[in-house]
């Protein structure tokens, strides 16, 4: 699955912890000894009644004779279960989501066929076989990962129990259906007004990758390396599907050649669904998407909007190899799916559109991930997950971001081609089967003859982030000390909540030189990095290419030397790492907020938008988490003084100017708007008026990136008249990206009366429940609106709770982690003690940790901030 879009914006704090969960962790695995080989499924959904009927045969092999067979089901009613002439009685275990079929006589060892007929419901919770709605009609669609295939068909619903599938759908004559493989028959009947669509037999695959989608989808088509590709949507949005096809054509060819293993399915479909919980889902040959992650107007959309679609497409397509062809043995190794897809997702798009600056995005993602993983309650990449609740919690910033970053570090160390060959060998050895972490690192170690096993084992099985503390360079060496880095100050580190044991990171450290970086593997026993005397060091920087998964603390003289030459000697990803390390060290109590702000000012002329974006994001954090109201006024004055001339120097948007320059202008514009620069506010108003007067994007002189920034600024200061316009845009389904932006912009208005309207709207049922939490979380995060939002949520809990799906409640709990007072912390604890949210205990402890960290950061750094501001020229 892809959580990307969501992760970047909203889930920065969401990491499951190693704390014991209070959910019952009873074993829920199937008993074993039963091997499903083939499922034949015929489903007949009733889109009006929101129900379906199913007939199913399962061919399986029994290891030993048995009178019982146990498999997974949820929300299914059995009509009959037979094998040959025997009819089974069915015993349900609701807690385990299992059914046991008991036969009068023993079934023989070897091949057995079960024939099952049943009924189920098309639910509204965005999981299993579920109902999605537009104003025009209903759709019946699926989302099975991780444990919801059992809601659509009785199954051995574990990733290692792979089988082949024949799928048929009986649907209304005017409707169509899309599934994993190509359509091989379309016959009228079995009753008047229906037709039956039959799909080709699938390869061996896991239960959670099956998909079937029913409705009136329309598709754009393309082709790559002989594979037909389609991007599909509801009929009104067909115009928005072309860019996804174009992206997928490039990416499929890229992957065929990168992996040296051809895309295995007869076709690739990508389908945007009006209601969808995650970002996208990699069903084999039939990828499903949230509309905003697939649909974009190829002519008028901004580059960031296109980047998002291309990256999510690349992520899901990478899963066709990592996950679909080769699947993790069990959910504890989910990172073998998600870490790989995350590591891979920018690679083909960066090759396709080098001007879109993906290396900088990767560096920013790494910085965010290091912060997530520097909290005391983080978890290991591989972690125990048995119950559906625990398995759902695995889809977090560790399985995606950390695992992806560790793979990027190993690739940087081995070199791209060596790593690519190791990836090929690993995949080739496990095609249509399952694999473990050991399988991967053994393949890389055998291929490279480097200690990849030791490196990966230490990162996969040990939680947290290494900190390298360097001393002054000596002839031929730089002394270095490894320790575990915590973002919080020492007194908040809860040393008792993480595993003790020897420090055992084995990590590659790459030193920047004037030519190729020199990489050394630092073991726990090493106390220095060897540096050959004769290499050219432009500046001593211990994370060449910015790919290392560690923080670095330099000596003051080393650090000052780096800063002095940062723009000329470091690449943009390295500068992003430099800024990220500095801020992290401030948060951990090793430095002051003044040191950090001095670094930002030293880098203020950086021509790279992503470097400044990363630097200024932390200034926003200082503004919202540390500053008093007086400090905020002074900080805004500093920002105006320092950045206004740089913004003015960029001039007006010009046709065909580089993307990075557009980004830089929009970033400074937004920064100055937040700092209430009068000229920028006036310009933002003007641009906003022009944008709302031009809903069909006819005015080619409007720069889409700058216009988006203008609306962000004006909505934060907006009145009721503007609110009406944004509200109307949030209800217009024509362009899902614009609709989603409008929804986020509604949450920026600060006038209390308008905030109340937004809150009422978010829980009214008018906002899709896939999106309702986004509005609530945004209001909780915003310093100006959080008190009001929190009171409202507590007072209107029934309405709020009614909007929650599998993970949205957890996301609201997570957003309370942005509070920064002891009073609110205590309210959060007492409120959620009596108002339970499913599977949120770990998230709640993390939120409490975050609040405590903020309180500590505020109390220690606010005097420093004040002092620094007072010393600024007035
Ligand atoms: Zn994924």
Image (spheres, grey):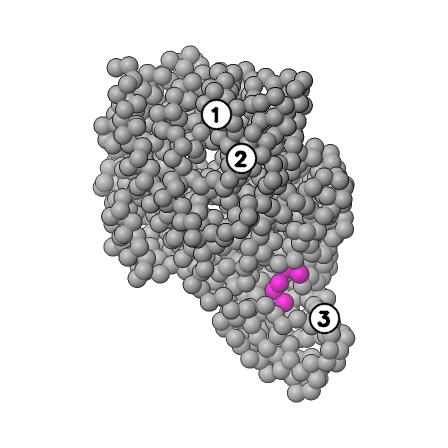
Element class at badge 1: loop
**Residue drawn at point x = 52 percent, y = 75 percent:** 93
Is residue 310 visible in the rendered structure shown here? no
* Residue underneath mark 3: 59
Is residue 660 visible in the rendered structure shown here? yes
* Residue underneath mark 2: 481
Earlier residue among tags 3 and 2:
3
Residue 555 got which mark?
1
Mark 1: few/some/many CA within 10 Å (<14, 14-19, 20+)? some
Residue 442 got which mark?
none
**Residue drawn at point x = 63 percent, y = 67 percent:** 156
Q: Which residues are magenta?
A: 156-160
Residue 802 position, x and y percent, is 36, 58
Query: Is 520 contained in the magenta span?
Result: no
Q: Looking at the rendering, which quadrant does residue 27 occupy?
A: bottom right
Earlier residue among tags 1 and 2:
2
Q: Nearer the viewer, residue 809 or 118?
A: 809
Q: Nearer the viewer, residue 794 or 758?
A: 794
The label nearer to you, 1 versus 3, is 1
- Main secondary-structure element of the magenta-colored stretch: loop
């Amino acid at each position: 699955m892809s959580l990307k879009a969501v992760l970047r914006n909203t889930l920065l704090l969401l990491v499951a912890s190693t704390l014991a969960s209070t959910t019952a962790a009873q074993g829920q695995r199937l008993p074993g000894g039963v091997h499903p080989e083939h499922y034949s499924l015929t489903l007949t959904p009733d889109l009006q009644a929101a129900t379906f009927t199913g007939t199913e045969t399962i061919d399986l092999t029994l290891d030993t004779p048995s009178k019982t067979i146990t498999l997974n089901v949820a929300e299914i009613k059995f009509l009959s279960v037979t094998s040959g002439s025997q009819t089974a009685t069915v015993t349900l275990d609701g807690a385990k989501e299992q059914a046991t079929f008991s036969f009068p006589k023993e079934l023989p060892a070897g091949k057995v066929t079960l024939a099952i007929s049943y009924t189920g419901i098309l639910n509204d919770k965005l999981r299993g076989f579920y109902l999605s709605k537009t104003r025009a009609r209903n759709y019946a669609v699926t989302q099975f990962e991780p444990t919801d295939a059992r809601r659509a068909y009785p199954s051995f619903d574990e990733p290692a129990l792979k089988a082949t599938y024949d799928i048929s759908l009986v649907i209304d004559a005017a409707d169509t259906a899309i599934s994993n493989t190509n359509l091989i028959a379309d016959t009228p009947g079995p009753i008047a007004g229906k037709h039956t669509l039959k799909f080709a037999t699938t390869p061996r695959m896991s239960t959670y990758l099956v998909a079937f989608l029913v409705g009136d989808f329309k598709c754009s088509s393309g082709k790559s390396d002989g594979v037909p590709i389609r991007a599909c949507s509801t009929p009104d949005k067909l115009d928005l599907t072309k860019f996804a096809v174009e992206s997928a054509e490039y990416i499929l060819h890229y992957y065929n050649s990168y992996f040296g293993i051809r895309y295995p399915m007869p076709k690739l479909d990508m389908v945007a669904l009006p209601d969808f919980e995650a970002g996208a889902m990699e069903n084999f040959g039939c990828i499903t998407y949230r509309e905003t992650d697939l649909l974009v107007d190829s002519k008028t959309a901004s580059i960031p909007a296109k980047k998002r679609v291309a990256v999510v497409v690349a992520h899901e397509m990478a899963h066709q190899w990592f996950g679909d062809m080769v699947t993790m043995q069990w959910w504890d190794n989910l990172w073998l799916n998600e870490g790989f897809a995350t590591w891979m997702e920018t690679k083909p798009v960066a090759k396709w559109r080098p001007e879109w600056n993906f290396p900088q995005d990767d560096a920013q993602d790494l910085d965010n991930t290091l912060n997530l993983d520097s909290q005391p309650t983080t978890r290991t990449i591989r972690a125990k997950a048995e119950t559906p609740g625990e398995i759902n919690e695995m889809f977090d910033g560790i399985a995606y971001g950390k695992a992806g970053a560790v793979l990027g570090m190993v690739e940087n160390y081995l070199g791209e081609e060596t790593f690519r060959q190791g990836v090929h060998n690993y995949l080739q050895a496990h095609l249509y089967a399952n694999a473990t972490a050991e399988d991967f690192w053994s393949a890389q170690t055998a291929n490279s003859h480097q200690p990849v096993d030791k490196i990966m084992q230490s990162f996969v099985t040990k939680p947290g982030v290494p900190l390298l503390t360097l001393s002054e360079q000596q002839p031929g060496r730089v002394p270095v000390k490894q320790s575990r880095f915590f973002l919080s100050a020492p007194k908040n580190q809860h040393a008792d909540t993480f595993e003790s044991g020897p420090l055992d990171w084995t990590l590659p450290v790459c030193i920047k030189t004037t030519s190729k970086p020199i990489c050394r593997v630092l073991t726990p026993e090493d106390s220095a990095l060897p540096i050959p005397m004769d290499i050219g060091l432009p500046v001593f920087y211990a994370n060449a290419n910015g790919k290392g998964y560690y923080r670095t603390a330099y000596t003051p003289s080393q650090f000052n030397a780096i800063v002095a030459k940062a723009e000329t000697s470091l690449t943009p990803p390295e500068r992003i790492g430099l800024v990220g390390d500095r801020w992290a060290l401030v948060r951990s109590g090793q430095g002051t907020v003044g040191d950090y702000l001095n670094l930002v000012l030293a880098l203020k002329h950086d021509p790279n938008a992503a470097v400044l974006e990363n630097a200024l994001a932390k200034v926003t954090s200082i503004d919202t988490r540390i500053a008093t109201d007086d400090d905020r006024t002074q900080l805004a004055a500093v920002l105006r003084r320092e950045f206004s001339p740089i913004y003015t120097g960029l001039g007006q948007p010009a046709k065909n100017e580089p993307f990075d320059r557009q980004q830089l202008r929009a970033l400074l514009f937004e920064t100055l708007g937040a700092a209430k620069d009068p000229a920028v506010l006036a310009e933002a108003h003007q641009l906003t008026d022009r944008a709302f007067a031009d809903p069909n994007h006819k005015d080619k002189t409007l720069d889409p990136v700058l216009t988006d920034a203008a609306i962000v600024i004006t909505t934060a200061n907006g009145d009721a008249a503007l609110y009406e316009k944004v509200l109307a845009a949030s209800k217009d389904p024509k362009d899902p990206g614009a609709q989603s932006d409008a929804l986020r912009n509604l949450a920026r208005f600060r006038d209390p009366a308008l905030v109340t309207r937004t809150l009422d709207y978010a829980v009214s049922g008018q906002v899709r429940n896939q999106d309702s939490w986004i509005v609530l979380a945004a209001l909780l995060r915003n310093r100006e609106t959080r008190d009001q939002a929190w009171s409202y949520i507590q007072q209107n809990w029934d309405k709020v709770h009614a909007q929650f799906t599998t993970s949205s409640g957890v996301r609201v709990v997570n957003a309370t982690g942005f509070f920064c007072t002891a009073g609110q912390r205590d309210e959060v604890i007492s409120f959620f003690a009596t108002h339970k949210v499913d599977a949120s205990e770990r998230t709640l402890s993390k939120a409490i940790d975050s609040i405590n960290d903020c309180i500590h950061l505020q109390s220690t750094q606010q005097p420093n901030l004040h002092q620094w501001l007072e010393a600024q020229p007035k």
